[in-house]
Image (tube, rainbow, N blue to C red):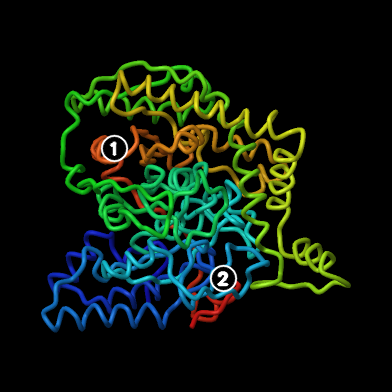
C-alpha cells in the first residue's frame, strides 16, 4: 500500500505518456491513486467524496481503448480530483455546504466533459470553503483541509482540497475555481502551480456560481507543463456559457519550451513595498533575478487603482453572491427545513443550510444592492473596476507580464485568522486585481521559507495571453523549483472506511 507522501501516481504528462506508450496501465495508476487516498487523506481531508467505482471503470475503459488500437487522449489514465462546486452527473456535488448535502446533479459541467473526452480518470470531489467563500478552507461545512507541508497550516482557499491533494501526491492534478484568488492562493500555500485563465477562456457551464463576473475554472498541477496541458484540454468555446469566448486556444504546452529572452517583466515597486514577510520578499527577488539571468528585461510599472482591489472585490463579489445564492431555498433540491409557511421554510432552510461566512457575504451583498446604496457601493465599485482595467492596459504597453507575490505570507496556521474576517480577506490582496480585471494569472512555487513552507510568485498577462504566463513561469520553475522536495506529511495508514469517515460522504 502507498504510504502518505510517496508518489506512486506521477504527474500529468508522466502518467499520460506512460499509459499511451503501454509502460503502465490506467487501471494500475487508478489503483495506486485510490490506495494513496486511503492512506493519506484521513490526515489531509482533501476529499469530500471518493468515486472508486467510477474511477476504476474509467481507467478500465482507457486500457480497453488502447488494447483495441484506438487513439488515446492527452490525459489518458491521468487521475484528477475535482473541486466540489463543479457538477458531476450522479456524483455528490455539495459546494461543501449543508444546504446541498447529498445533491447529485443530472449533468456534467463542461470542464468535466472535456476531462472525460481527454481520457482523464476523475477520482472524486475535493474539499473547499463553502460555496468557494474563503481563503483557508476552514469554512467547509465538513471540516478543514490540512496543508501537506505542515498539518497545522492552512492549505489556502477556497480550492484548498484540490491544492492539498496535488501537493500530497494523492492525484496527478486537480480542478479548482478562482473568483478572487482561489486557485492561485492555495497553489502558493501548497507549493503547486495554479492558473486562473482569462475570463471567458474556460466555460463556466456546470460551475455552481458564486460571483458570475469573476468565477473561472482553473487547474492545479505539480509542474508548469502539466498545468499547460490541462488548460489546453479545458479551454475553448462553449455555447451553453454566454460569457464563453470565441477565440482560438493557444499552444500552452509548447509555450513552456520557449525562452524568455527579451520578454519584458513588469514589477510594481509599490506592491513589493507592502510585503512585510522577509521570506516572501526574498523569493520574489529570486524570481526577478532568475528571469533576468534567463534574458528577460525587468521594467517598473504602476497599477495605481490596484490598492482598491480589496474594497472593490468585497462589494462586487458579495453582491453577485447575494443574487446567485437566492436559488437555494429548499424548494427544488438540497436541504429543506419545514416551517409554518413558505417564508418560514425559506428562513429556516437557509439559516440551517448556510455557514457563517456565506451568511456574512450574502448580507454584505444584499446591503450593497439595496435601494439607496446601489449607486454608492456596487455601481461605484464597478466604475473603479474599469479604471483598474485601464491601469493594466497602460502597464502592458510597457511590459509583457507583471510579476508580484501571490500571497503576503506563506501558509498561516489553521485558526490564526478565522476569528478576524478582515485579516483573512487580506490574504488575497495580491490575487484580487487580476480577477477583477478578468486577466489570466498564474502562481508558481519559487522556493521555501525559513520554516520550510512553499512561497509562490504570481505572473499576470493581458487577456488571452496565457502562453506568456507559461513561458515565464517555466523559467522561474526551472531556476527555483526543479529540484524542490515533496512534502512528507506523517499520517497513519487508512482504509476505505477511514476515507469515507474523514470525507463526510461515502465512497462508492
Neighbor class of circle 2 (other Cα within 10 Å; few <14, some 14-19, many 20+) is many
Image spot of residue 7 (x, y percent): 32, 63
- Mark 2 lies on a secondary structure that is helix
Identify which residue, 275 or 241, lies in the foreground.
241
Examine the rendered structure and indicate whether residue 285 appears above or below residue 461: above
Quadrant where the N terminus is found in the figure: bottom left
Image spot of residue 454 (x, y percent): 43, 42
Q: Residue at x 63, y 68 (%)?
A: 100
Give the residue at the far right of this rendering: 340
Examine the rendered structure and indicate whether residue 331 appears above or below residue 149: below
Q: How far apart are marks 2 and 1 (CA)?
A: 38 Å
Examine the rendered structure and indicate whether residue 299 appears above or below residue 321: above
Image spot of residue 481 (x, y percent): 30, 42
Is residue 79 toward the left or the right of residue 151 in the image? left
Q: Quadrant of residue 174?
A: bottom left
From this viewpoint, is residue 477 visible?
no
From this viewpoint, is residue 141 visible?
yes
Identify which residue, 389 or 297, lies in the foreground.
389
The circle drawn on residue 503 is 2
Is residue 504 toward the left or the right of residue 183 in the image? right
Q: In which quarter of the image is residue 261?
A: top left
Location of mark 1 (residue): 465
- Mark 1 lies on a secondary structure that is loop
Q: Residue at x 55, y 79 (%)?
A: 506
Neighbor class of circle 1 (other Cα within 10 Å; few <14, some 14-19, many 20+) is some
Is residue 24 toward the left or the right of residue 32 in the image? left
Identify which residue, 112 or 452, lies in the foreground.
112
Q: Residue at x 33, y 75 (%)?
A: 30
Query: Which badge, 2 or 1, comes first in the chain's sequence?
Result: 1
Image spot of residue 106 (x, y percent): 49, 76
> Which mark's residue is nearer the viewer, 2 or 1?
1
Amino acid at each position: 500500500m502507498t504510504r502518505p507522501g510517496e508518489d506512486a501516481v506521477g504527474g500529468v504528462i508522466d502518467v499520460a505518456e506512460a499509459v499511451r506508450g503501454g509502460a503502465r496501465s490506467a487501471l494500475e495508476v487508478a489503483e495506486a491513486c485510490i490506495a494513496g487516498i486511503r492512506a493519506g487523506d484521513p490526515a489531509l481531508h482533501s476529499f469530500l467524496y471518493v468515486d472508486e467505482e467510477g474511477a476504476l471503470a474509467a481507467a478500465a475503459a482507457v486500457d480497453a481503448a488502447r488494447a483495441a488500437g484506438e487513439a488515446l487522449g492527452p490525459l489518458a489514465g491521468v487521475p484528477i480530483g475535482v473541486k466540489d462546486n463543479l457538477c458531476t452527473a450522479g456524483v455528490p456535488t455539495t459546494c461543501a455546504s449543508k444546504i446541498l448535502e447529498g445533491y447529485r446533479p443530472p449533468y456534467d459541467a463542461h470542464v468535466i466533459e472535456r476531462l472525460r473526452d481527454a481520457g482523464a480518470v476523475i477520482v472524486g470531489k475535493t474539499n473547499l470553503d463553502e460555496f468557494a467563500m474563503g481563503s483557508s478552507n476552514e469554512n467547509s461545512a465538513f471540516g478543514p483541509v490540512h496543508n501537506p507541508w505542515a498539518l497545522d497550516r492552512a492549505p489556502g482557499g477556497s480550492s484548498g482540497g484540490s491544492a492539498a491533494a496535488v501537493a500530497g501526491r494523492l492525484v496527478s492534478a486537480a480542478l479548482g475555481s478562482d473568483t478572487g484568488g482561489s486557485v492561485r492562493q492555495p497553489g502558493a500555500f501548497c507549493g503547486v502551480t495554479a492558473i486562473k485563465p482569462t475570463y471567458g477562456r474556460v466555460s463556466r457551464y456546470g460551475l455552481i456560481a458564486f460571483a458570475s463576473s469573476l468565477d473561472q475554472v482553473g487547474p492545479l498541477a505539480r509542474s508548469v507543463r502539466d498545468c499547460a496541458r490541462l488548460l489546453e484540454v479545458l479551454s475553448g468555446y462553449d455555447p451553453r456559457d454566454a460569457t464563453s469566448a470565441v477565440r482560438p486556444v493557444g499552444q500552452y504546452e509548447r509555450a513552456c519550451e520557449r525562452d524568455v529572452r527579451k520578454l519584458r517583466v513588469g514589477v510594481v515597486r509599490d506592491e513589493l513595498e507592502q510585503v512585510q514577510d522577509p521570506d516572501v520578499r526574498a523569493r520574489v527577488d529570486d524570481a526577478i533575478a532568475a528571469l533576468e539571468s534567463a534574458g528577460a528585461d525587468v521594467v517598473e510599472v504602476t497599477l495605481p487603482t490596484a490598492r482598491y482591489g480589496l474594497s472593490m472585490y468585497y462589494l462586487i463579489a458579495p453582491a453577485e453572491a447575494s443574487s446567485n445564492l437566492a436559488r437555494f431555498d429548499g424548494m427544488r433540491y438540497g436541504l429543506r427545513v419545514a416551517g409554518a409557511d413558505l417564508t418560514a421554510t425559506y428562513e429556516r432552510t437557509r439559516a440551517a443550510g448556510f455557514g457563517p461566512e456565506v451568511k456574512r457575504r450574502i448580507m454584505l451583498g444584499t446591503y450593497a444592492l439595496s435601494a439607496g446604496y446601489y449607486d454608492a457601493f456596487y455601481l461605484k465599485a464597478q466604475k473603479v473596476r474599469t479604471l483598474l482595467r485601464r491601469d493594466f492596459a497602460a502597464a502592458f504597453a510597457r511590459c509583457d507580464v507583471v510579476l508580484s507575490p501571490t500571497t503576503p505570507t506563506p501558509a498561516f496556521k489553521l485558526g490564526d485568522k478565522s476569528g478576524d474576517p478582515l485579516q483573512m480577506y487580506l490574504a488575497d490582496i495580491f490575487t484580487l486585481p487580476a480577477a477583477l480585471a478578468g486577466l489570466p494569472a498564474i502562481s508558481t512555487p519559487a522556493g521555501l521559507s525559513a520554516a520550510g513552507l512553499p512561497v509562490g510568485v504570481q505572473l499576470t498577462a493581458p487577456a488571452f495571453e496565457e502562453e506568456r504566463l507559461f513561458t515565464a513561469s517555466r523559467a522561474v520553475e526551472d531556476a527555483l523549483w526543479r529540484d524542490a522536495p515533496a512534502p512528507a506529511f506523517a499520517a497513519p495508514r487508512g482504509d476505505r472506511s477511514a476515507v469515507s469517515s474523514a470525507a463526510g460522504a461515502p465512497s462508492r
